[in-house]
Structures are given as C-alpha cells and as structure tokens.
Image (tube, rainbow, N blue to C red):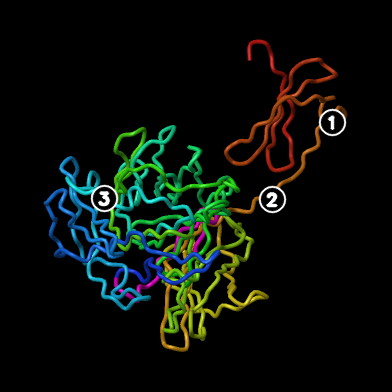
Amino acid sequence: MKKRVNNLKKIPLIPFIKGGIIAIFALIFFTNQEISAKTIAYWRFENGTAGVQHTGTNDDFYVDSSGNSNAMSNIPTEDAPTATDDIPFATVPVTGEPNTLALDFVPNSVILTQNDITNKMVDSYVFSNGWTIEATVKFNDGFGNGWPVIVGKDGNPGGGAPPFFLKLIKFDPPFIQADFFSDDNVEHWFDGRSCCGGSGETEIFPDKWYNLAVTYDGSNVAKLYIKEETDIEYELEATSQQSNIGPATFPWDTHWSIGRGMWGGGVADWVDGTIDEVRISDVALDPTQFVAYTEILVPQPPSFKEISYSPYPEPLDTDEVTISANITTANSTLTNVTYEYSVDGGAWQGPFPMATNTTPDAYVGNIISQVHYSVVSFKMRAENTDGMSSTTEVYKYTVCEDIPWKTVLVSSNAVAGGYNMASMSVAPEGFAGFVYRSAVENKAQYIEESELGVMKPSVNISIDS
C-alpha cells in the first residue's frame, strides 16, 4: 500500500488484469465464542446490460445474493446508476463465480433497500456481535459531490452524520474515512491520518480500484482496511480513535444506500464513479478471510513503492543525488532493476543498475551532480524471472546553485565605530547592505558590499534621506 510521502507523485503500474485486480468478498467461517460469520446482504449488480440504465423504481431490481431478500431499488426522487462492464476482476476469487457487471454512479444517482411494499431485513437487523461492511470503488475525475459516500445507512442519530458511512474526504490528498454511531448515540469517525487513528493516509486517485473493508468487533474497536489494485494483501489503514465503544448494533430501522449519503437528515454526498461487490456481514471478519487476502500463487509484475530522491526537494549543483524505491514482485524473483535519467529534456542516459542496501526490497541508484538550474528527469524499470516488467512514470527535480557565503564582521573599530546593527538587505546580485548606528557620530549609517566580503565606505543617513 502506498502511503503519502512528502509530495512525490504516485506510480501508475502497467496493468496486467483489465481494470485492476482484486475486490472485496469474504464468506469463510470465523469462530468467536462459537459465533459463525453470516452474510446479511451482498449486492453484486450482475443483472442488467452494460451501458443500459435501469429506469424502474421501487422494484427490487438489484438482487441481494445473500438470500435474505435485501434487494435494492432506484427511487423516483433520485437518478439511477448505469450498468457497466468496467469491472475490478473477471471472477470472484473465493467462489469462482463470474463477475461481468458493476454500477456506474453519477452525482444524484443512488440505490436503496426500499420498495413500496416490503421492509428489508437488513434495515432493522441488530448487529449484536459486530459487523463487516465491504465495497470496491473506482472514482472518476472529480470524485463526486461533497464528501462522496460509497455505502451508508440513512438517518441522523445526532449532529449531522448518519448511522454509518464509508466515504471519501476530498482534501488534498483525498482519503477514505469511516464513521458510525454506537447505540448510545456517540459518533466514532476515523481515517488514515495520524491525528485520526492511522499512521499515514492512503491517497486516493481517480481511475483506480480500491477495496475497502470496515470491521467492528461488537464491543471494543473498529478498523478500516484498504487494498489497492496492485497490492497483494489488505493493509490496516486506521483503528477507531476510541476503544471500549460498547454496542454498535445499528438499532435505527432505516434504509442502506449505495452511491450517496446523508447529512443533517437530508440526502447529500453523491459518488461519481463505479461501485461493485458491496457486502455486509454480522461479525468482524479477520483480514485473512477477505477474498483479496487469499494466497495468490500466480506471478505478478514488479511493484514500486516509496519512490524518493535525496537531497530533497532541491539538490545543489555540488550534490550527487541518490534515488531509491522499494520494489517487490509476488511469486517471482527480481532479476534486473535499472534507472535512466535525462537533463533538460535531452537524451536518456543509461540504463544503469540499481543496487540493494541492507533492506532486501530497497533499491538505490546515483545521479551525478548537474549544472545549477538544470531539470533532471528519472525513471526506474524492474524485471522478474517470469518475464514481467514494470516501469515508473517520470519524476523530476530542479538543481539549485550552491552559493558560497562569506562572513562580514562589523565592529566599532573596523567600520566607523558601528554597533547595534538594525537591518540588512541583499541586492539582486547577492551583495549585502546594512543599516547601523554609529557610536562615534551618533548617526544612522548605511554600508554595503562592493564584492563578496569587501565593504564600501559607510554613508550617513540624514533626516532628509
């Protein structure tokens, strides 16, 4: 998982499965005081036709695969999503079931657990032993309106927030946040920021699949997991800021929504993007039970993380610059890791081999010092024993001039009895000027350099100056 590090851009890898790789689904027995995990609702969006918007309302069109009759519907007051064959994976890894469709949401489109006749079991279900809520999402440019909610439960227990939502916070950079109420109407929100239960937020980019899971153990803490499309495993993004939370059973008999949330009791926060494989379970699943955690023995292309260079951010023209990255390849072995660089848009130099240091996955290379004001571009490439390769995008830095500084001593003897220097200025060519008070003449004086370290005669500053 790529965490935010300084202001370096993230690395798009060459895709090896159309649209990304893994999404979220888990249905494996989990023993906790003899409680078995049960799927309460599971929306896969497999009915429909790619490119076609289902226009019916309150008709239970979006099937619940759990068997608990929690079908979702479009509603008359909001727009409908469109079926799409832009999917995160072609087969559900844990079941082998084909995955052919997902739902493309635009602002003001939503589906809900409602129709004109039947109340849905999931709306009033009491999650007394905890829960797991999972979804897979890929945002479009712009992400959506407000702070887009991927999965939510309608209502307003207190303040502005609904009983639950899993949403994108559109800060710079954007990140995922989970928020829920315990039964005592206390709100609990958390995300990857160090201030809010995490150790560094995962930056969310448009046009990439993200696999999300929020769990609550029924009495103590909640956790947020994220698996990016190039990751092998889910990683813990954040833990709830409070512990010993107590029951959080969702006692409010309100609809669940996909594609938008609520705020202050009103609808808000629509997604602009594609959502697939939304699932709710009645215990906190262990990460090893998520389908994306399933051991993958198929060789995978090399993956780059933590791209950096040093000195950062602006090397001097006397500096040799060290570039580095953590590089791994699943179920294979790296055979060739190289880098290239160019100066001011010129021809690429290299490739040059990158070497490992004391950390097995860490690779480093060196770029020789360059003339100041040069713009240096660099990229990295890695190959494995299965003939797969990955290349980073191009990174750039600007070389600054290393200007030698000289110390100028101003004293009462050396410069007209000066002391108590009041101000300093630097001319465009780098020469310094000083204003000080003369002890001899008890007048303001101005003195400046004629060249580095050489002072001109001081000048009195009169009242009229």
* Marking on residue 113: 3
Up the image or down, 236 lies above or below 243; here it is below
Q: Which residue is mark 2?
A: 404
In this view of the protein, which residue sits in the foreground, 386 or 164?
164
Could you tell me the amino acid type at mark 3? Thr
* Residue farthest to the top, as pictured: 463
What residue is drawn where x is 49% and y is 64%? Answer: 35
* Residue farthest to the front, as pictured: 34
In this view of the protein, which residue sits in the foreground, 304 or 331?
331
Who comes first in sequence, dot 2 or dot 1?
Answer: 2
Who comes first in sequence, dot 3 or dot 1?
Answer: 3
> Circle 3 — which element?
loop
What residue is drawn where x is 69% and y is 36%? Answer: 449
Up the image or down, 177 lies above or below 31; here it is above
What residue is drawn where x is 35% and y is 51%? Answer: 151
* Mark 3 → mark 2, Cα distance in angstroms: 70 Å
Q: Which residue is mark 1?
A: 411
